[in-house]
Amino acid sequence: MNVQQMTLNQIRFLGIESLARDLGPVGMVRFLQQFETGLGDYTSERKEWLRDQDIKALGKKIMEEQRLRYPNSEIDHVGAASISNPSR
């Protein structure tokens, strides 16, 4: 195997094949994810999403979501106390 004469597609295929063989499918994906940079500008987008939100409104949304997800839990009582009184 002479990598100098291989195309980039051939090298890519052999590389992925080697990763899958040696790391398994999950390990291969985890390895490849290290090099994924993603798209967009999270900081700018986050500022846009949160532009009209204040901390109390966000806390209220979090509490509502917790109540929906965990209806029989006391987690909302603890969260409500810590949101309404941050010193706790």
Image (cartoon, rainbow, N blue to C red):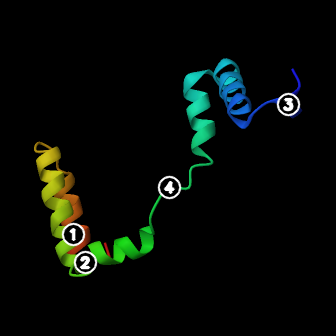
Circle 3: element type: helix
> N-terminal of the two: label 1 or label 4?
4
Q: Position of residue 46 (x, y in %)?
A: 35, 71
Circle 4: element type: loop
Q: Residues within 10 Å of mark 3 (few under 14, many from 20)?
A: few
Circle 1: element type: helix
Q: Amino acid at mark 2?
A: Ile
Residue position for label 4: 38
> N-terminal of the two: label 4 or label 3?
3
Vertical side of 57 occupied by 1: above or below = above
Q: Quadrant of residue 40?
A: bottom left
**Toward the viewer: 21 or 81?**
21
**Toward the viewer: 38 or 26?**
38
Residue drawn at 43 percent across, 73 percent down: 43
- Between disc 1 and disc 4, the foreground one is 4
Q: Amino acid at mark 1?
A: Gly
Q: Quadrant of residue 86?
A: bottom left
Evaluate if marks 1 and 3 touch, with contact meaning CB atoms under 8 Å apart.
no
> N-terminal of the two: label 1 or label 3?
3
**Gap in Å between the C-alphas at discs 2 and 1?**
6 Å
Does residue 40 appear in this view?
Answer: yes
Residue drawn at 27 percent across, 72 percent down: 49
Residue position for label 2: 55
**Gap in Å between the C-alphas at discs 1 and 3?**
59 Å
The mark tally for this picture is: 4
**Gap in Å between the C-alphas at discs 1 and 4?**
28 Å
**Gap in Å between the C-alphas at discs 4 and 3?**
32 Å
**Gap in Å between the C-alphas at discs 2 and 4?**
28 Å
- Between disc 2 and disc 4, the foreground one is 4
